[in-house]
Image: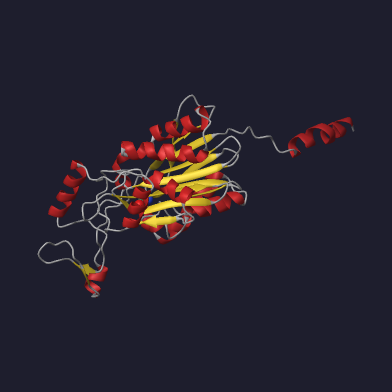
Amino acid sequence: MYLCLFILCYVLPYYAQPQAKVLSLPLVINTWPFTNATKKGWEVIYTNKGSNLDAVVAGCTECEQQQCDGSVGFGGSPDETGETTLDAMIMDGDTHDVGAVGDLRRVKNAIGVARAVMDHTENTLIVGESATRFAIEMGFKEESLATNSSLAEWKKWKMSNCQPNYWKNVVPDPKTHCGPYTPEHSQLLRDRDFKKPVSRLNHDTIGIIVIDDKGRVAAGTSTNGLTFKIHGRVGDSPIMGAGSYASNEAGAAAATGDGDIMMRFLPSFNAVTMLANGMSVDEAAKRSIQPIIRYYPKFVGAVIVANVSGDYGAACHGLKSFHFSVRVKEMSDVTVVEVPCI
Ligand code: GLY
């Protein structure tokens, strides 16, 4: 009798109550072991008590200046004309304001220009030469994004008959074996397997999420896209819901990988929607990638996810594992976390 009363009064209420979660905010998390970017973001949000948007810009700018893995910023991923072009976006989870640039030419600080689109226009995405014109108007410097190494890489590719490339169902110029290409509809060419150069090494977008100590969320991306991409190609990174997505109601997500495929599935938007429905960060990350694999079993990419309580996680496919960088107060420095892929 006394035992029953004890269980009813003391033991059951303890188990019925949700355990109070120790919030660990602010939080900075970004794709890949781009730890200097995480450090910069942390410096802004924690040390300098700056805003989450400023921290996103600082993290991505650091990677743009350091040419992280050659896949962010100037001097990497020359397109088929030898030019490096940039994609970037930033999203404020408080207001759902977004600024983005695609196929930005001759301006190094793509994330800065994306922020200017958000801060100084009612528009969302500006592309190509028009994005360059906008950037110059906003005070950004116009300069070549080519380097000796990006030009050497491009020349070597030209010498190899512009292979591999991203064209399909076309015939190259018979003299150059490169462009201009003409459409070809014969079954023979349709079935030919054009080799595509998608790999970890030419797909290392920085995607970053910053949540401040009030749970306010921001996210962003910056990349120079695919090596030897078709001139004018824009990837997933500046597409909201694909490259990244942020909402104070749930959290944020950011993606890296084969953007031509990812933008068909909006994995970042899906992950945040799943967080809003109460799913854990790990599960939301996994489930945002699963529909992609059903259609594209060879897909290579990853998604990082964080919720407004400060939980974070990631999921990936097509690699052995994926590394992301993270910093919260409890860590003495930026930590690189490895997750096995599904
Ligand atoms: N995820 C980078 C790109 O495909 O452009």
Q: How is the image coloured?
A: secondary structure
Residue at (21% x, 42% y) in the render: 147
Q: Is residue 334 above or below residue 104?
A: above
- x and y percentages locating residue 131 in the rendered image: 36, 54
Residue 255 as seen in the image, left or right of residue 284:
left
Which image quadrant is residue 146 in? Answer: top left
In the rendered image of this protein, does residue 249 appear above or below residue 263?
above
Q: Quadrant of the N terminus?
A: top right
Residue 321 image position (x, y, % from top left): 40, 42
* Horizontal and vertical percent position of residue 61: 38, 39
Outermost residue toward the left in this view? 175
Residue in the picture at 62% in, 52% down: 277
Going by the picture, which residue comes out furthest to the right? 1
- In this view, 267 is above or below 20: below
Residue 189 percent location from the top left of the image: 22, 70
Q: How many marks?
A: 0
Residue situated in front as seen by the camera: 4 or 138 = 138
Closer to us: 227 or 90: 90
Mark yes or no: residue 222 visible. Answer: yes
Is any atom of residue 324 visible in this view?
no
In the image as oriented, which residue stretches furthest toward the bottom?
186
- Residue found 42% across the figure and 61% down from its top: 295
**Residue 9 vs residue 314, the one in the foreground:** 314
Q: Quadrant of residue 193?
A: bottom left
